[in-house]
Image: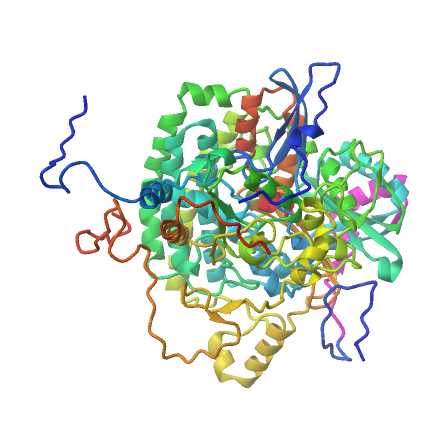
Amino acid sequence: MRAYKAKDNVQAKAYYTDRFYKSPQVPKSPPESDEVFNSDLEAIKSKFEVLDSFIQVEQLVVFINPKDNYGVLELMRDELEYSQLSEMSAIDWVADRGGFEVFYQLLSMNKRKRIRIKMFIKDGDALNSVEKLFRSADWSEREMFDMFGIEALGHPFMKRILMPYDWSGHPLLKTYPLQGDEAASWYEVDKIYGKEAREEIGPENRDSSRVDRYDSDRFSRLGHEVPKGTKITGDEPEVVQPYQEEGGVFLVKKFHKDSTTIVDDPQR
Amino acid sequence: MAQIKNRLTPFFENITFDRDDNELILNFGPQHPSSHGQLRLMLHLQQEQIVKAHPDIGYLHRGMEKMAENMIYNEFMPTTDRMDYIASSSNNYGFALAVEKLIGLEVPRRAKVIRMMLLEINRLMSHLFWLATTALDIGAMTIFLFAFREREYLMDIIEGYCGARLTHAAIRIGGVPLDIQDNFISQLKTFLDELPQNIKDYENLLDTNRIWLMRMEEVGTISKEMSHSWGCSGPMLRASGTAWDIRKEEPYELYDEVEFNVPWSDRGDNFARYRIYMEEMRETAKILYQCIDIYDKCVKDGQTELMAHSPKYISASKLDIMTQNYSLMQHFVLVTQGMRPPVGEVYVATESPKGELGFFINSQGGPYPYRLKLRAPSFYHAGILTDLLPGHYIPDVVSIIGTTNIVFGEVDR
Amino acid sequence: MAQHKVNYTQDGGLPVALTSIDKIVNWGRSNSLWALTYGLACCGIEMMASGASRYDFDRFGTIFRASPRQADVMIVAGTLTKKHAEFIKRLYDQMTEPRWVISMGSCANTGGMFNTYATVQGVDRVIPVDLYLPGCAPRPETLQYGVMLLQQKIRSKQASKAQKAKRLM
């Protein structure tokens, strides 16, 4: 019987986990333990609903409602001096919680602080684009759309960025296998030669681990390859692969080692 | 050979000629000698002036983030080499630091200083490479040959340390695998002693060169607001009037113990960026001299530890593995199953030669990261071309791409 | 006027050499292999290094050209992604006969460490390859040796006959 594999999460799994193993947590501290973070958090709390907040690895993490994202980021930029959106992307939680966690990583150069704004959106929902606030979100949101299929409303050019426009599937979803799906494995053939070339080439040629009967062993010793599976006895003569034919090349002088000087000192 | 039939239509079919205006759409790349990799630009031209630029990336997208989700943490280390392949160790370091922050490791001092030396050597290599390629794109072939000559010396030093010229994988999570080789310091000192003269040579060729100045001055000016809005970092940010260097502001390793200046400018144009790269090379040499002193002091104090001691996450030393049963078992588990960092999230930014290199890791307690996001500086520096190129002329495109110093392993990941 | 200081009584006598067409054509071809700059990723940096001051590719007669129409050999240096596959085919078709392809590095050979959805598992799935260079990234010495092997291969072939179709996939 084949082992059951969950289709909703094809990420590599640990093949063995101790039943009694309980993972430790990265320590969290309350936001009150840092003055700057505390005042920032109060400023956000005064206008928007904050679901959760804590400091983890020197950075404040704030959970907000997805509808507030534009407002919160506007507040952060204009009033709290968080002038850079250094990163934004999503985490796929579709299998467990039916949605995505989107995070915005903000940097304030005046305060030397980094804040991560996080929110949870349901699978299939779109979020508000923050491209008008931070231009860097222009490409980040396109990348997020490309990788997860999360659309940003109000984005001027919501198209794929890393994958080609005619690509199917969103690669960073947990349902998407690392080696790609059927369409991905034939992508370049379909594009260059057309779909009918699939039969001519054969699906076995798409398997990167396939061993052909014409394959050879010892292919690095040019001219002395052996068919795959041949027993190599080990008493074969040593082969020196010359870079020129024996007896020299027409009109080209052979390089003689004796008549040259070798400079050993690299610091010369 | 008869041409194999294919479905590819001639490319000009994509372009409409029956437009009312004079706008011409020019396709630049993805395989262009001066596009620093696989950048494709769709340029809308009004005669020679660009009215709209549309950078198209993804031609080197290799799925690194997906790979990371299917690899144990130590396994992913060599893959980070292929991101910014001009300064591989800085990527190794960014990833190692992120995992160390996640599990809360403290790295021994001797490993720290070796890491710092590797990082700064990588910075020099990257800046020299930047100078070589940018100068070549603009037409200064001599600089290309000069800078590559210097870079080869550094590559020899690195090769002596880790065995590879380009893809180093020289840093491990929890420290460094090896001590530096015997002639590392002496070779480095020889190189550093000659570096100021070499930099002066480049500057003599470029600083007052009329062609260089015309291609550089007042071209590609990025305002302070624009640089912040686009998430610029590194020399791109410092050339636009913000003196922000993560090594200085959020010091990691021993950067708070060494003295160096952060060169910055408020001109924001290509020339400012060029000057900042040159000045940074000098500052890097300064840091390296101080690193050598710190290293010598470590040796004198008898600090021999190179890896952090944390049996749960880090394998013991080779000697322990070979002699002690428990270390061997631990090593076996760590190699076959991988370390299991605590549940949590971390975003760690380091100052790579290109700018802010960040690693965001979401760990769910398993041996594989649940999500790993690579924040590459070049990604945003390529994005800024959308806003930067309009208004410039075609020849400026090459010099602007040159000074943004984008590397496509990093942009597309 | 340049002074030709050739002693015709010694260095092989008169400036006349008798040879076959094959030999002279192959001599020309193998010693002026103009390469198309096809730096895709990390290996492209090593390709540049082999063209730069220390390794000096020019002494092989290998000069990098930016146009496929002027190039004889395409050095595919780096990872070929599915998005890019179309363009490598396009550029290969634009090269004039005879043409050769060197696949440089593990990624171009087999996809290398990037066995993912986005990577073509070997450039030989799109264009025929003459020479595979192992390594990640191969050193410039490897590339130089590869070019020398390619020269040897060119010299061993008949020049006058039309090039036989190479096996693809």
- Name above or below for residue A66 compared with residue A81: below
Q: What residue range appears in magenta? A: A22-51
Which quarter shows the N terminus of chain A? bottom right
Quarter assignment of residue B64: bottom right
Residue B51 in percent (x, y) is at 68, 20
- On whether residue A41 falls in the magenta region, the answer is yes
- On whether residue A142 falls in the magenta region, the answer is no
Find the residue positioned furthest to the bottom.
B325
Left or right of A245, for residue A99: right
Name which residue lies at 40% across and 21% down: B209
Quarter assignment of residue B224: top right
Name which residue lies at 66% across and 43% down: B6
Residue B245 in percent (x, y) is at 57, 40
Quarter assignment of residue B178: bottom left
Name which residue lies at 44% across and 78% down: A232
Left or right of A174, for residue B7: left
The answer to whether any part of residue B87 appears in the image is: no
The answer to whether any part of residue B178 appears in the image is: yes
- Report the front residue among B124 and B305: B124
Residue C81 in percent (x, y) is at 63, 48
Residue B162 in percent (x, y) is at 44, 60
Left or right of A199, for residue B248: left
Find the residue positioned furthest to the left.
C9
- Report the front residue among C125 and A201: A201
- Name above or below for residue B173 compared with residue B201: below
Query: How many numbered marks does the figure carry?
Result: 0
